[in-house]
Image (tube, rainbow, N blue to C red):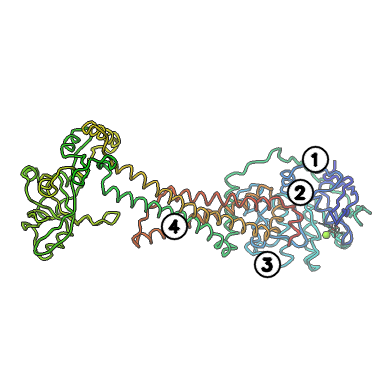
Amino acid sequence: MALIELSGIRKHYPAGEQDVEVLHGIDLSIEAGEFMAIMGSSGSGKSTLMHLLGCLDQPSGGEYRFAGRLVTEMDHEQLAWLRREMFGFVFQSYHLVGTASAWENVALPAIYAGMPREERKQRAQRLLGELGLGERLEHLPNQLSGGQQQRVSIARALMNGGKVILADEPTGALDSVSGEAVMEQLRELARQGHTVIVITHDAEVAAHADRVVEIHDGRVIDDRRHRPLHEDSSRVVAEPPAQSSLPDAAEVGEAVVMALRSLRANWLRTLLTLLGIVIGVGAVVVMLAIGEGAKQDVVARINDQGTNLLVIRPDRGQQRVADGVIATLVPEDAEALKQLPNVRTAVPEISGSVTARANGQDASTNVQAVTPDFTSLRDWRPAQGIFFGEQDQKAYAPVAVIGQTVKEKLFADGDPLGQFVMLDSIPFQVIGVMSAQGATNWGEDQDDVVFVPLSTGTLRLFGQNYLRSITLAVDDVAYIDDTEQAAVELLTQRHGQKDVRVFNMASLLDMVSQTQNTLTVLLGSIAAISLLVGGIGVMNIMLVSVTERIHEIGIRMATGARQRNILQQFLTEAVVVSALGGIIGVTVGVLVGGLLIWLGMAIVFSVPVMVAAFLCATLIGLLFGFAPALKAARLNPVEALSND
Ligand code: ADP
Ligand code: MG
């Protein structure tokens, strides 16, 4: 059985409306260990035939058997296996990868055969040494002469064994001395047992071979043997793997190394591609940190007011008006509410505007008549002096505690303690000055206030004891809703009807944080869109990269890369770019956020957001890199190779 058996092989190419047939039924049988030449004039179909022999292209008709196996029925994976394990190519224009050194070019086929890196390097260096290039291992192809490049490509053909060496015009681009040397090397390979098929238009070159097959216009017109076949030529067994193997860690690692190299080769472009992802990821990180910061800021302000508070006010709809006030809540209600479970304290309050006078100064201010518990309820205490106590409350003492604003207005140049302030012409003695509290969220000055005991206030200032509010502080916020309900029930029972409304600080907090969450989602989606745009940038650049490297893809396929390897390589590049962009983006986001914190903005970083943004970027690389990678993997090896 012959190693290679062609019968009736046809090849036609589409040309305009109809096809043009280039090979018109080639019958050829090649034994293992043969050193043969296929000779013919330019355009006779030699290269086309070689591409079919080397499984770089598929015939339009006829049968091709390799070691007894029907090649015409093999799938992509098996064809790649044949190219990788059985064939070695030597081309007229060398077809070396321009960005890889001599030894790396030689080692290329072994990557796809799964040989470990060190072993690969050693074997490549040994092969180059045997071909007299031991000194040129690290040279790039453009640093080598034509003859040297051709020897590199011969070494590459031998890397995985190269049972069949297919050489298409190997001397075509060389001077006669280098050409002789190359032919001598091919003869030597044949002597060692390789099957060597040289394609040439030159009868002198063909004369080196033991057998010359001449083709003309796509037909074999002559087949002569000058020397007998080696007796010792061994039988070739070709057993392609039945199933495609899965990529292993080493293969993925190799793809990452290759990806980093090609990204480095185009570092400016890589940088610009990265920029899209960096901005997207950075924006997500910063925007969400700003949103979360704003939310926590507002929540903290509300918390300052006390989320454990329930404020009970008369219901405006249930008016029982006495002297212009809603006559509903009375101080005894507060005493009753204090008895409810979970109620720590209940502070009744009446307030109103008064004219305060002291030291010959007038100021309109707000007076609040409260019980002594007020200070613990609001966690707000005097800065000077004391707050009034139960004694003052019981004794209807005419004492007052003033806020900082009132102090400034009336006692600008003296100590107010012990002095008298006239509230609507009634004298009160100042016993304390509250600490500064600042403005509320809605801009009200909380320090423009005078506190007096509830008893004194109802008797002397307001002339009635209907309350403006009762504020409850609960012990456990978890049960605040139950306490609210109990308070309403109690008051309804006491008043004979439901005539109060309760303001729950906790539910206000819920509402506000929901609003802020919406804001955060909004900011986040704007950022996510920019991430998406970054992803489209990756796709764009990968498409350019594939187009630019079609020739390299062709070389990789000729040396045995599977479709999967090519797909994996470009996907890896896309993912590496995106992941790199993700890491830089998170870093930039943190730096920008740090700057904003330094500028006094409320920023709250979230590690899950950072991780998610990074993963998102990587995923986007995978998604948007897929189409370009698939495009590369589906290229036809011959067409890719001819794309110089
Ligand atoms: P040789 O190598 O003997 O010089 P080729 O095999 O390269 O010849 O080409 C044989 C014929 O096939 C030529 O006429 C060429 O124009 C044609 N041919 C080769 N490749 C293609 C192709 N991809 N599409 C169309 N025609 C092609
Ligand atoms: Mg040719």
Element assignment for label 2: loop
x and y, in percent, of residue 64 in the image: 83, 44
Residue denoted by label 1: 69
Between circles 4 and 2, the one closer to the viewer is: 4
Q: Which residue is mark 2?
A: 163
Q: Quadrant of the C terminus?
A: bottom right
Q: Which residue is mark 3?
A: 142
Report how far apart the C-alphas of labels 1 and 3 lie in the structure: 40 Å
Residue 520 — which label?
A: none
Q: Residues within 10 Å of mark 2 (few under 14, many from 20)?
A: many
From the image, tell me which residue sits under label 4: 589
Under mark 3, the amino acid is Asn
Whichever of labels 3 and 4 marks the residue nearer the N terminus, that label is 3
The amino acid marked with disc number 1 is Arg
Q: Quadrant of residue 639?
A: bottom right
- Labels 3, 4: front one: 4
Q: Element under label 4?
A: helix
In the rendered image, residue 387, in percent from the top left (x then y), is placed at 11, 49
Quadrant (top left/top right/bottom left/bottom right) for the N terminus: top right
Q: Amino acid at mark 4?
A: Gly
**Whole-number angstrom distance, CA of label 4 to CA of label 2:** 56 Å
CA gap between label 2 and label 3 equals 28 Å
